[in-house]
């Protein structure tokens, strides 16, 4: 199917079909959770080393402490192990609540502690939890596109990241990931090879510019965020932001 402009039209962004607000919270950093995150961070590094050949550029741009909003592009299942293996410590993140019910993996993710998010719905509890996290000086990761890209390139970004950046005043760090497309990673693994994956860390920035209305400000901020991600990506990955 094609749009009126002649471009292929993409499937609509996903909307969570369950509503479980009782699960949405900022995970408390208990001793047990800190220990599990250290274990998980090490496990992700090992998994990435076995299954991927990850190279990292710009890691010196990653600050030692928050508050910090990390924004990433999202193209495959291996984005998370590639990203976490490249970072000096395990961050917080917003995750789709559908993962909670996955056997074993859902429980492991909950033990790690994510801010569960109902995608495509007005999830005020998730936004408040993220803002509370920034107030505590946490580093939080979000994928502004809201799903795996169905094209492998950047899709239109949602306004959640810009809203959080404006409300919290936290700086933004764009991190671009390439090579983690499922066909590429799993195709290499079937041949007992490791896919080449690259993680590129950009530079900190704050949202700039003024707008007369909040909706306009969020739209402008979203364009800034997505443009920052696009600037770190090869042309074929830039998609809507070429």
Image (spheres, helix red, strand yellow):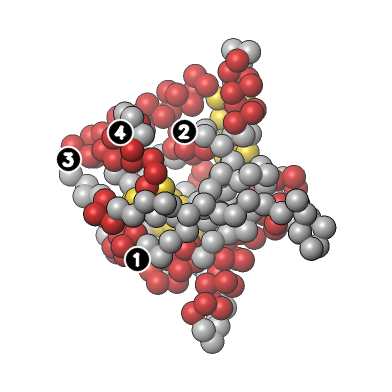
- Which labelled disc corresponds to residue 108? 4
| Residue 53 in the image: above or below residue 177 | above
Residue 222 position, x and y percent, is 57, 66
Q: Quadrant of the C terminus?
A: bottom right
What is the total number of numbered labels drawn onto the structure image? Answer: 4
> What residue sits right under mark 1 in the picture?
124
Asked which secondary structure carries label 3, the reply is helix
Q: Residue at x 31, y 28 (%)?
A: 104
Q: Residue at x 33, y 55 (%)?
A: 19
Most extreme residue toward the top is 192
> What residue sits right under mark 2 in the picture?
81
Asked which secondary structure carries label 2, the reply is helix
Which corner quadrant of the image does residue 103 belong to?
A: top left
Which corner quadrant of the image does residue 122 belong to?
A: bottom left
Task: Kindly check if marks 3 and 4 are in contact, taking CB atoms under 8 A apart as contact.
Answer: no
- Which labelled disc corresponds to residue 31? 3
C-alpha span from label 3 to label 2: 23 Å
């Amino acid at each position: 199917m094609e749009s009126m402009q002649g471009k292929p039209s993409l499937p609509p962004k996903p909307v969570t079909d369950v509503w479980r607000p009782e699960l949405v919270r900022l995970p408390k950093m208990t001793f047990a959770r800190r220990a599990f995150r250290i274990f998980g961070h090490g496990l992700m590094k090992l998994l990435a080393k076995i299954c991927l050949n990850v190279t990292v550029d710009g890691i010196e741009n990653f600050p030692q402490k928050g508050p910090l909003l990390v924004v990433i592009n999202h193209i495959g299942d291996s984005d998370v192990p590639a990203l976490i293996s490249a970072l000096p410590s395990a961050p917080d993140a917003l995750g789709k609540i559908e993962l909670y019910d996955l056997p074993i993996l859902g429980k492991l993710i909950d033990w790690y502690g994510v801010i569960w998010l109902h995608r495509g719905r007005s999830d005020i509890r998730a936004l408040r939890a993220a803002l509370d996290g920034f107030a505590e000086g946490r580093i939080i990761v979000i994928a502004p596109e809201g799903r795996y890209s169905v094209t492998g390139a950047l899709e239109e970004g949602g306004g959640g990241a810009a809203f959080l950046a404006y409300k919290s005043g936290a700086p933004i760090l764009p991190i671009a990931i390439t090579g983690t497309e499922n066909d590429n990673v799993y195709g290499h693994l079937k041949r007992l090879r490791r896919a080449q994956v690259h993680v590129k860390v950009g530079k900190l920035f704050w949202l700039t510019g003024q707008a007369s209305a909040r909706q306009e400000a969020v739209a402008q901020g979203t364009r800034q965020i997505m443009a920052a991600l696009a600037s770190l990506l090869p042309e074929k990955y830039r998609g809507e932001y070429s």
